[in-house]
Image (tube, rainbow, N blue to C red):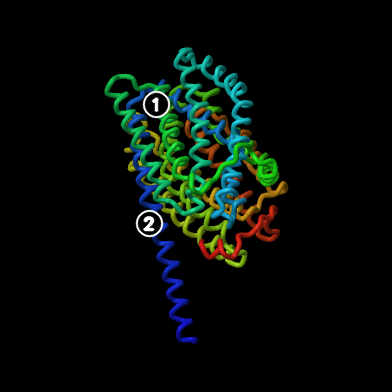
Amino acid sequence: MFGLARPMSIRLRTDKSLRRLRILLVYMTGQGLVQFVSLFLGLLVLRWLNVDNYAQFSVAFGFQATMGLLTDLGFAGTIIALVGSRGNDPDVVGSYIRSGRHLRNVMLACLTPVAAIVYVFIARQHHWDILPSVLLFISIIASIYFSGMVSYYGAPLLIRGRLSHFYRHQLTGAVFRLVVTGILYLSGGLNAWTISWTNALGMLLIGWLNARESRPFATLPLHHVPEVTRQMVRYIMPNMPNIIFYALQGQISLFLISFFGQTRSIAEVGALGRLGQIFLLLFGFNSAVIEPFMAKLPGTRVLRNFLAVFAVASSICTAICLVGFFEPRWLLLLLGARYASLQQETGWLMFGSCIGYLATVIWTVCGARRWLYWTTTWVNIGMTVAAQIVFLLLFKVDTTLHVIWFGVATSTGYLISALFNAVYGYNRGPRIKIPEASAVERIVE
């Protein structure tokens, strides 16, 4: 009897290891291809657009990032955590998608007029032409709406472990953007608003593919379920000040240089931001692999796995920082001759980005384990604001290097508060309790 049990336990551990290895290989292949195409496209756009057009595109990208966070307010990220081990029930998954999209659409309708006022102010200050500016702003709104389709309809694929399908859609959208951008460049029609619309249509394509693929795994009700909507709001509420705060200040460096700096500095900050795409492979791993994995773990295994994940992430960030400070020329080759002088800025950019990434790893685990509290939210905001105030008292943010240093200060406050949140959440446990999957569902998983 004991002789049979031992080979069976070994076989189960082997199967689990092989399954994890397969997930890792699918992720590295899929996310790697998507990020390679996206990085290649971003570098082409950087070289093909003149400084003025790239400055406009950078401002538009900053607006899109900020409005995207304010519109979603983190509701898309609640689906995996709140579904938990009930991922095999299409009705449960579909009810969360319907409620999340309802909340997102309401927020988009409310925020669009406010964003338009701020955008007009920046466009007038830099004397941008009216028609291209209008077309660019409309593309921002379209991108935010279509990105909602991408995130919400992609959640069922991540819950069910359909990473190969998920990344196939992402790669299709990336190739679409690459081809259309090439056609625009060869035909002489590439500028800030046409590339922005190309990105929006690429998101529409990915969202449609995700929606088609996820139909067997998510049955959406005709209307949002009030109970589910209230649960999503209750779950995200303590973290909402955090999200609003970081949505407004996430692009604050670009907005500060837009108000106080020159167009050249805006383009340099936007160009250096392209180097930040190196981290997109790592950020994607957070949501595609770490979050679903940590959300399903029993409480006894959380600490060990969290420490292992954080140790690996720290090692990767150390290597990136060393390259940034001691061999920045290799990274600047990607940006072209216009930005070859930004060697010091590149090292500090990599350092600040690494600190920020380690903070997001911690917050990913906290979100997956439902460790979101009012106390930690205000600690997070307070630490970050304190770091920014100290910096602004010492420096004026009117050069590219000062913008990068401002980002380092911000990321440092973010990391300290994330560590506090993890310790607090681990000791206190999940704030929101959810039903567990039945025994049959656990066997199926």
Q: Residues within 10 Å of mark 2 (few under 14, many from 20)?
A: few
Q: Quadrant of residue 271?
A: top left
Residue marked by disc 2? 25
Kindly state the secondary structure of the residue where label 1 is placed: helix
Measured Cα–Cα span from mark 1 to mark 2: 32 Å
Residue plotted at (53% across, 65% down): 443
* Closer to us: 427 or 152: 152
Q: Residues within 10 Å of mark 1 (few under 14, many from 20)?
A: many
* Closer to us: 80 or 278: 80
Q: Residue furthest front?
A: 222
Residue marked by disc 1? 195
Residue plotted at (49% across, 32% down): 146
Q: Answer yes or no: is residue 9 visible.
A: yes
* Closer to us: 114 or 169: 169
- Tag 1: residue type? Ile
Image location of residue 42, percent across then percent down: 37, 34
Kindly state the secondary structure of the residue where label 2 is placed: helix
Image location of residue 11, percent across then percent down: 42, 74
Query: Which of the marked residues, 1 or 2, is nearer the chain's N terminus?
Result: 2
* Closer to us: 141 or 342: 141
Q: Answer yes or no: is residue 386 visible.
A: no
Image location of residue 37, percent across then percent down: 34, 40
Image location of residue 1, percent across then percent down: 49, 87
- Tag 2: residue type? Leu
